[in-house]
Image: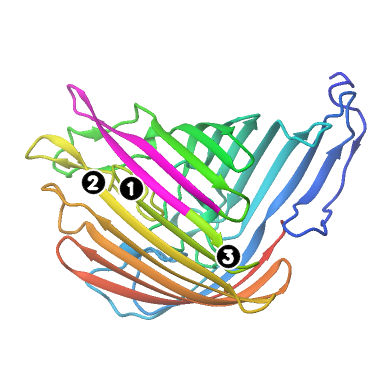
Amino acid sequence: MSRHIMPARITIVLILFQAKANAQIAIANTEPDASGRKWSAYLKGFVQTDAMLNFQEMGAKDGIVAPSIVIPQHNSMSSYFSVRQSQVGLGFKQTDQNGDSPVSAYVEIDLYGSNGTTSPRLRHAYVQWKKWLIGQTWSNFSDSEIFPNIFDFNGANGAMLNRSMQVRYTEKLSDKETLSFSLEDPGKVSMTIPGNHTEWKKKSLIPIVTGMYRYGNTKDYVKLGGTLSPVNYENQEKGYTKIGFGGIVSLRKYVNGLDNFRFQTSYGKGVARNNLVLSGEGYDAVFDPQRNTAETLSLFNIVGIYEHWWSLKWSSVVYYSYSQMGSNSAVTNSMMKRFQNAAINLIYKPYKNLRIGMEGNYAMTENFGEMKANAFRLQFSTSFSFK
């Protein structure tokens, strides 16, 4: 390789902790080439340990998932200890002489392996080139900025937050405005098909289309988004497509230097794949054997979050989330009709990268058979970040 493209001498910086808040750990840097471009690599992530006390039986252990509460309710106390939320990410980026980064790549894993193991699981893997992003990361019809300072793995169940394979284009309209569009993996769409109709099956065909407009700065912002979500399915003779649609409004507003309010609401049909706890659970559409067709299900979500800092080291978050599914003749009694969850925490931050605290979580679910169940959880956690 030419020395004008990649200089021979590479400066390796081994685990250099940066002094600035939210800085990453730089692990490698190259000397600038003739045009002033250089490459760098960095690590980011955190190590988290959790101890949980459940007062009712739930299918989900690491995070509150209201639809996983066992119905009828089973009041059985249990404890659970985990490090599965821990994450590590590795990034590479090229920086030009103006400080811009036209090319970058990022890979991130956690320990949320299948069947309750701590095997590594891929979270993000993507390449960015100028205004284009290709790979797996948060869906463009999501808002990762809405996630507050909590310990629970899921948080507000009504949030639209899901990772997806995609091709995304982002245009900066002004200092405060960006507009992005994406084509995303149609395989993320899921539907429920009765077990006695094996001649029908879901298939991946037409990509999901999304658009998102963001106005604001790094702290205060509002997002408006929309999506068209095709539900593709077939039998042995022919393929069919139903088009789902959805919209989202999401915002964050700082009341003072630290306290802030976050809000999100969304509605659509065939868009449950983007919901934090419904992705892959068959709520995008239900096959109706009486009409011999699939019907998209509507979903309404609303989330409110408030974060308060008692001092520079003590903070609390309180939130409430509500979600409701639409009904049709193909919905079964065991499917979720509505669910909600709420939480409050107290977090102590003795050092910049260290958090210690406890959370109280409540969740409730109701199915279309009019059966309800609720659950309570106490969580004690410690988290050390290196970013």
238 vs 344, left or right, is left
Dot placed on the residue nearer the N-terminal end, 2 or 1: 1
| Residue that extends furthest to the right in the rendered view of this protein | 9
Please tell me whether mark 3 sits on a helix, a strand or a loop: loop
Quick one: label 1, few (<14), some, or many (20+) residues within 10 Å?
Answer: many
The residue tagged 2 is 297
Residue in the foreground of this view, choosing between 347 and 98: 98
For badge 2, the amino acid type reads: Leu
| Residue that extends furthest to the top in the rendered view of this protein | 2
Q: How far apart are labels 2 and 3 at the CA level?
A: 36 Å
Q: Quadrant of residue 94?
A: top right
Which one is in front in this view, the residue at disc 2 or the one at disc 3?
2
Q: How far apart are labels 3 and 1 at the CA level?
A: 28 Å
Q: Residue at x 34, y 65 (%)?
A: 66
What's the colour scheme? rainbow
Q: Which residues are magenta?
A: 221-250
| Numbered mark located on residue 114 in the image | none
Image coordinates for residue 269, horizontal then vertical, percent: 27, 43
Instruction: Relative to 20, say whether 92 is above or below.
Output: above
Contact, mark 2 vs mark 1 (Cβ under 8 Å): yes
Instruction: Relative to 113, say whether 199 is above or below.
Output: above
Please tell me whether mark 1 sits on a helix, a strand or a loop: helix
| Numbered mark located on residue 272 in the image | 1
Image coordinates for residue 201, horizontal then vertical, percent: 24, 34
Q: Residue at x 81, y 47 (%)?
A: 27
Confirm whether the magenta stretch covers residue 132. no
Contact, mark 3 vs mark 1 (Cβ under 8 Å): no
Q: Residue at x 83, y 29 (%)?
A: 37
For badge 1, the amino acid type reads: Ala
For the stretch drawn in magenta, the main secondary structure is: strand
Q: How far apart are labels 2 and 1 at the CA level?
A: 8 Å
| Numbered mark located on residue 83 in the image | 3
